[in-house]
Each structure stands twice: as C-alpha cells, then as structure tokens.
Amino acid sequence: MSVDTSSLNLEKVVPQAEDFLPILGTDFVELYVGNAKQAALYYMHCWGFQPVAYRGLETGSKDAVSYVLRQDKITLVLTSPLTSGGPINAHIDAHGDGVKVVALWVDDATKSWEETTKRGGESCLKPEVREDENGKVVFSGIHTYGETLHIFVERKDYNGPFLPGYKAWNPEFRTPEVGLKYIDHMVGNVGWNEMNKWCEFYAKVMGFAQLVSFDDKDISTEYTALMSKVMSNGNGRIKFPINEPAEGRKKSQIEEYIDFYNGAGVQHIAVATDNIIETVTALKARGVEFLTVPNTYYETVLDRVGEIDEDLEPLQKLGILIDRDDEGYLLQIFTKPILDRPTMFFEIIQRKGAQSFGKGNFKALFEAIEREQEMRGTL
C-alpha cells in the first residue's frame, strides 16, 4: 500500500527531537463510527476517497466491520460494531463518531513498542504478528490522550490491499478525487492544564520536540481563548498540535469540544493539497460546508502577507485564509464540524513554503467558530 511519504518535500528536520523512534509516516487513521457503510459513502461522495479494502462478516469478522478508503497518501478506516455492548459501542456512546487510532508507519514495531514503553508509555498492544496469504504485518501500540491510541505498523513484509484480515473492496460506485495529498498535521484537544503533560509525553515517550507555542495572547478573541503547542518527530513527518482551554469571558471551542466529546480527543485533521482553490471548489460542490470570514478580512490581508501567486478574488469567494512566515506563505480553510456533535472537523491546507500553522489567521478563524457556537447556543 501507499503511505505518507509525500510530506518529505515539506519536511523540516527538527534537530531538538531525539529520534530513537523513527517514524516513516502516517499509516492510517481509524474512526469508530455508528454506521461504517454510510460513513464510507460520505467520504467517497463528498471527499473523493477511493474504496480499498473491507473486513466484516464475509471475511470472518463477527464483532466489527471496517471499510478502508484512500486518497493519495491518506488512508481512513471506518469501523462499526456488529453486536451490542463491547468497547466500540462504549466509545461511540461516550464520544460519538471520532478518531480512535492514529497509526504510525515504522520499520520495527517491536522496537517502537520497547522504546516507548520503557520511557513510560502505557501499552495497549504488545508486539503481535498477523499473517495471511499476502504476507505478515507486525503491530504494537500505546495509549495517548483520552481514549486515543497510537498503533505502530511494520508492513515491509506485506503486499495485500491493506492488512491481514481484509479483502480488496471494489464497489461500482466511485467518485473523482479532489486533490487531497497527505496528512499535514493532526490536532488534539485536551482538558484544563493538560497541554504540558501531553507535550512532555510526546517529548519523553516518543522523542518529539516542540516546534512552536501559542498562548492566550496569540489565540484569543473578545470572548474566548486557548493555548497550543506543536510537537513534531525528528524527521518532521508527524506533527501533533496539542490544545487546551484558556480563561475567557465565554466558552471556547476547546471547552465545547471536550463537553460534547466527553474528554480529550482528535479535534481536526489537516490535509494537504497542491491546489486549494480547485480542492475547495470540488468539496463545496459535493456538499462539504466551510467556516466563513467577513469580506473585510480580505481588505487588508495582502498588506499583512505581501504578494502571493494566486488572485485574491477566488480566495475571497471561497473563504480561504492566507498567512506568511519567514519561509513562505500558506493557504488554509476549515470545515464546519462534520458530525452532529460539534467535535471533529477538517482543515484543508496548501503550503507555499511556509512551515507554520496560520497564526495570523487565528483571530478571524476563532471569531468564525464563535459565530457557529452562538448559533448552537454553546458559546
């Protein structure tokens, strides 16, 4: 299978990171969902993901069903329970649909488990080999914030469509891709005063280093605030911003997330594109809804970010935000929550040299989120 290596052309080696845990990329992201068949159709129709593999009753799985979708280097696994009770049901009941597993592609899953657990990581899966006619895969895993897991996947001896236990899935229904390339970063929301705890976890247990830090002076509006730190592995292919709430006059988006998710979890997945105008145009045409900013944002944005390659008019029409750092600029836009609970959403990002995360857009973005919170009655 194809996994996340295309971020190599953007990677920025992080010298402070102690890279005892070489990570080759994001292997897959697994979501526990109430109805995997319908969720798969959503990601295929609206997001252009392609069918890859299936596991269910027909393959001998009696307790759960999973559909595997892929677009370029991004692999999603959508899993639902087939019986009542059990851990998948409990997860969905507590959190709604959401990310359960962030799987990391490694050369040696046994060594990854040994290195992380001896540094204090809590094991969720001891090294285990699974095999079928296509070869073998070694898995291991540890717990991270909330009920989220990191599974280490060693697949150099496997040639099947996805993993042992899955069969190729080739339905007639397919849609064109929308230009999504790879996962740029994944953001975790944690509770009050927990950000430093989890940043220390990634530093100590996984050898990550802190790229950047934002406090409530950087990320605040008249009403709400939060704090964030971005952790990266040594080769820069994996970036995990960690958010926590900060004191504000009203309830922040992080507090809203934690209330509805019932704890810490993955807030959003940032996916990269080489042409954000084409990608967002296609997504909107398929029904994906995005946050909007006032037209006044575009009256002064070029004064702040300088010259860009794109015409401003289509960016303004689509609501795409612009920011610049010392190495270039970026274009980004955020969906509304993709679930009924105001929890998980997606970011679409195109980097034109910039390695940052859109600090100049924080105020406009958070005000847009607050407008949505006000409509929901949760601000």
Image (cartoon, helix red, strand yellow):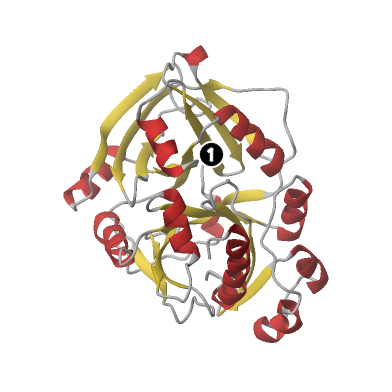
Q: Residue at x 53, y 51 (%)?
A: 344
Q: Nearer the viewer, residue 340 or 174?
A: 340
Q: Quadrant of residue 312?
A: bottom right
Specify the farthest residue to the bottom.
Answer: 303
Please state which amino acid type lies under the numbered disc 1: Leu
Label 1: state its secondary structure: strand
Q: Is residue 291 left or right of residue 14?
A: right
Left or right: 249, with 130 as reference point: right
Q: Can residue 238 be seen from the camera position used here? A: no
* In-image side of 260 versus 180 (left or right): left
Q: Nearer the viewer, residue 44 or 223?
A: 223
Which residue is located at x 57 percent, y 70 percent? 366
For image coordinates 26% across by 33% down, the residue present is: 127
What is the x, y in percent for residue 88? Answer: 40, 32
Q: Judge whether 47 appears above or below 125 on screen.
A: below
Q: Position of residue 21 (x, y in %)?
A: 30, 51
Which residue is the extreme one toward the left? 118
Q: Please provide percent x and percent y for residue 348.
A: 63, 57
Q: Is residue 150 visible?
A: yes
Q: Is residue 287 left or right of residue 205?
A: right
Which residue occupies the extreme front position in the image? 377
Q: Measured from the top left, where is residue 70 in percent x and y? A: 59, 38
- In which quarter of the view is residue 301 placed? bottom right
User: So how many labels did they put on this image?
Assistant: 1
Q: Nearer the viewer, residue 80 or 240?
A: 80
Q: Which residue is mark 1?
A: 76
Which picture quadrant has residue 322? bottom right
Mark 1 closeness class: few <14, some 14–19, many ≥20 residues within 10 Å: many
